[in-house]
Amino acid sequence: MALSALADLDHFKATPFPPGYPAAARTFYSPVDDVHGALAAVLASAGSSVVVSMYGYDDASLNEVLRSKLADAKIFVQLSLDSTQAAGTSEKLLLAPWQNDGTGNSIAIGHSEKSAIMHLKLVIVDGLDVVTGSTNWSTGGETRQDNQLTVIRDPLVAAEARARVDVIHDGMLKQMAARRASGGAAPVSPPSPRRPAADRPAAARRPARPVPPG
C-alpha cells in the first residue's frame, strides 16, 4: 500500500523532524536513525513498480520484501546489481531463488559502461518516490556505518532517475548476453577504484628513496 505521505516515515527518525521540514523529502542517518525500517517501509509501499539499482545487496529481509512484490503479477520488479558485489557468498545465496525469466521480473548484473563498478544506491517506487544516498543494503551499512538515506517524493525526480537506471540496466543485460554468447565466461571484474593520494596512508604517498649510484 502506497505511503499516504512521506510523513508516514517520521517514526523511523531518532529526533523529530523540525517544523517546516519539506513535505516532499525525508532524510535519515545511520547509525542514529532506523534506516533499515525506513527502507523496508518504502519498499513495502510499492503498488505498481519497484526499480532498484544497488551496489551492496546483502540484506535478507529487504530481499524478502522485494520477492513479495515479485510474487504479485501486478507489480513490476527491476533489479540492477554490481557484478563485483553480487559475486559474494551471501549475495549469491540471496539471489539464487530469483527467477529472471518470470513475468514482470528483470535482473541484470554487470558493471558500468566505462567498465568500472556500478556504485548507485537508488530505488524508485511507483514512479513517485526515490530513495537515494550512501547506504548499501547490509547490516553494517544500515546500522553501524555513517550513512545517509533520503526519500524524495517527486514524479519528475523519479522520471529522471528511472531514465538513467534503465540505461544502466539495459547495458548490463547486453553484457550478460555477450557473456552467454561467448560461452558463459565469468564477467571480468572492473578494477578497484584507486583512492586519491590525499586519502592514502602517508607511506603509500611517500616518494621512492633514490638509489645511490653504484
Image: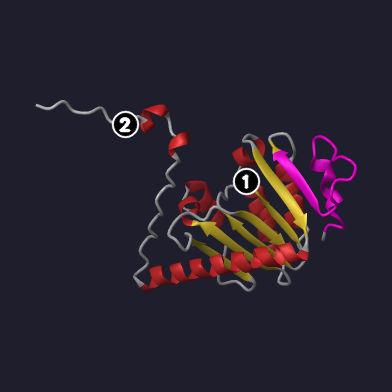
Residue 68 position, x and y percent, is 70, 60
Picture disc at residue 95: none
Q: Is residue 91 magenta?
A: no
Residue located at (48% from left, 54% from top): 117
Q: Which badge, 2 or 1, is on the more N-terminal residue? A: 1
Quadrant for the N terminus in the image: bottom right
Picture disc at residue 134: 1
Magenta stretch bounds: 3-29
Residue located at (50% from left, 68% from top): 171
40 displayed left or right of 18: left
- From where the camera sits, is residue 97 visible? no
Residue 95 position, x and y percent, is 55, 57
Identity, as a three-letter code, of the amino acid under mark 2: Pro
Residue beneath disc 2: 207
Residue 141: image quadrant is top right
Is there a contact, CB below 8 Å, between mark 2 and mark 1? no
Residue 80 position, x and y percent, is 56, 61
Residue located at (73% from left, 56% from top): 43
Q: Nearer the viewer, residue 192 or 173?
A: 192
Mark 2 or 1, closer to the camera: 2
Q: Is residue 9 magenta?
A: yes
Q: Residue furthest right?
A: 19
58 displayed left or right of 34: left
Badge 1 element = loop
Q: Does 39 sit above or below residue 204?
A: below
Residue 159 position, x and y percent, is 70, 67
Identity, as a three-letter code, of the amino acid under mark 1: Ser
Badge 2 element = loop
Q: Nearer the viewer, residue 189 or 67?
A: 189
Residue 213: image quadrant is top left
